[in-house]
Amino acid sequence: MRSATSRHTSFCRLCASSCGVLLDVEDGRIARVLGDAHHPISAGYTCPKGRRGGDLGHGPDRLTTSMRRTADGTHEPVPVARATVEIADRLRAIVDRYGPDAVALFMGTQQNFAALTPPMARAWFKGTGSHKLFSTMTIDQSAKWVVAERMGTYLGGRQRFEDADVWLLAGTNPVVSGNGGDGDGAVVQNPSVTLRAARDRGLRLIVVDPRRTETAALADIHLAPKPGTDAVLLAGLLHVILAEGLHDGGFCGRHVADLPALASAVSGVTPALVQDVCGVPSDRVREAARVFARGRRGMATSGTGLCMGPHSNLAEHLVAALNVVCGRYLREGERADDRAVLTRHVPARAEVAPPARAYESGFRSRVGGVRAIRGELPSGILADEILEPGPDRVRALVVSGGNPAAALPDRAKALRALESLDLLVCVDPRMSDTARLAHYVIAPTTMYERADHTAIMEPFFPRRFAQFTPAVVTPPPGVVDDWRFFLGLAAASGQPLKFAGRILDPAAPPSSEQMLAMTAERGRVPFADLVAAPHGHLAGDSGAVVGPATEDAAGHRLQLLPDDVRAELRAALTEGAVDPRFPLSLVVRRIRESVNSTGIRVPGLVPGATNPARMHPRDLADLGVTDGQQVTVRSASGRVRATARADGTLARGVVSMTHCFGSLDPDDDVGVNVNELTGTDTGVQTINAMPTLTAVPVAVEPATEGRGDEG
């Protein structure tokens, strides 16, 4: 009998790129994933993990029913309705005994690519009354929030990649990650083609990265600082720009409070000093600063390489200062950067939202006195929130679309914390490390089994674009849309749940399509028109322009050098000598084949299927290690055993590995987790408790026989 085959149009939901895809479905299963050549922004591009979307949905490790942990530590199938009631009962007992702050929610990266899940998870959590909200944002990019709180925000909008003639990328590798901007449409779709086309039209590309990454290979200027010295390099770029008068005096005069203070603070960070500290030749520092400042339009943008490293709050602040000093923002009367298609349009104005420092008044944790920032506690203290005794110690944790067992620093402590919980619930289509420790694992639909649209991703798109997709394949009968789980959990807990201004009736819930239509009510494209556009909808120019400053905001100014930033710069410039016990630096890298821990277990997807320790060939030779030999990587926090690989793109003294690998299952040969090497005792940022997860001091040596190291 011939198979029943059909082709469907949809879009991928593994990362912010949201690439358009064509799905060949045979007998109800996705047999092939192709790029959609008619897609207006991805134009047929797909990445390796996207092309394996069928395996992610149908693989042998896919959960087709929810699971409950038994007394002997194994898991047994349980209907999701029963699991939901049991979870609600256990949560109620914990809250009744210990109070609402004994309950926490951890929101992971993968929930962000389902339009309905984040608002529903937050709505359920709000009903608990707890303050203990965590997410992956505060373990890799919370420095961006800190900058906005300390510097303020210009509300006219950022300049765009599409018409830029210079761009600086720091600590990000969009050719691999598909993420090179901060909501400015930079290098998200089809990154190699996008960068090459931009350079063909005259854009000058500057890349800051200790490795000659795939993106750095396309750059006009590649600055390769020693790992962890980005803040000094950025201060040096500002020194050149301000010393040579290359800044935008008009923009700074109108919108900046303390430019002379910044100029004074970086006056001693000369190119010669940068060369001494960072290892970047002084002439390259001058060249990069002049090229960036003399560009007519263009931004400096950053990624997790900066936010996860030492002095991350300072480094991010200095990236933002580069943009401010050079006036890289839209002015009154210019066409506004209006990419709101399904979401509400917010008028742009040529004014400043002043520094709020809301973290100084947010909920205060008993762990180090750390306060919530933008409603979230830093994930760097989650393990301590669970382990440290106290009346509001976290005893129940719900994990939505994340894998904190793999992502949190000091993995031994993180695992100890997760294992000690009275209740751990994980919403995950697979038995991830976190799921293996959970009391309940809720099996959700996967991306091609649910209806969805791109509202959450609009800030990342290079054009005014939106797309809707229906469910393409029928999910297994034992799974549930994760948003429905949170609605059911609220109902079983007796909590009303408000969504899009409505109290939902759990006895007669809307369909996913109705829910998606609710979220798009304030958009400028009728939902019916979106549904009728299988390849997505390009919205026209709204005609919006940057308006004048309001009377109340006319006096607001950006703060480039508040006292705490000044102190952080001083500390970065006086950093102590390298610890001779750990003479090398471990930097984390991303790969095309996975998004954090998603994809690492798909057979044949990750080359070699492990997580090697990559080093410069001469460093390996100095250690007497050959390519493919086992080595031990040690830090002050732990050690791992890995396979050494020669990598000529690395500078001397650098070890490079990928984060979120490893497994609690000894039979899973998927490499090691670098968080065995990270800790929370030193190198932690103030304000956001961000630990150092890249540029970690390490030592490498040939592995000895035996099982003392991880393999």
Image (cartoon, grey):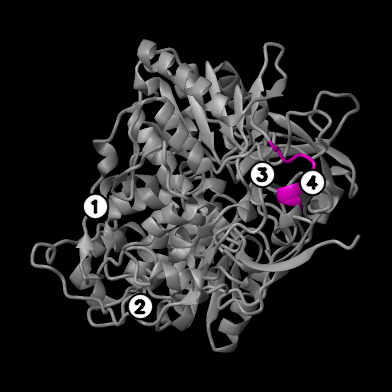
Q: Is residue 264 left or right of residue 74?
A: left
Q: Is residue 544 left or right of residue 492?
A: left
Question: Contact (CB < 8 A) between labels 2 and 1?
Answer: no
Residue 367, position in %: x, y? 40, 24
Residues at marks 3 and 4, CA–CA distance in whole angstroms = 15 Å
In the rendered structure, which segment of residues is drawn in magenta?
55-64
Local SS, label 2: loop
In the rendered structure, does residue 56 fall within the stretch colored magenta? yes
In the rendered structure, does residue 396 fall within the stretch colored magenta? no
Mark positioned earlier in the residue sequence (4 or 1):
1
Mark seen at residue 612: 4
Mark seen at residue 355: 1
Q: Is residue 434 above or below residue 74?
A: below
Question: Contact (CB < 8 A) between labels 1 and 3?
Answer: no
Mark positioned earlier in the residue sequence (2 or 3):
2
Q: Amino acid at mark 2?
A: Leu
Q: Which residue is mark 3?
A: 597
Residues at marks 4 and 1, CA–CA distance in whole angstroms = 43 Å
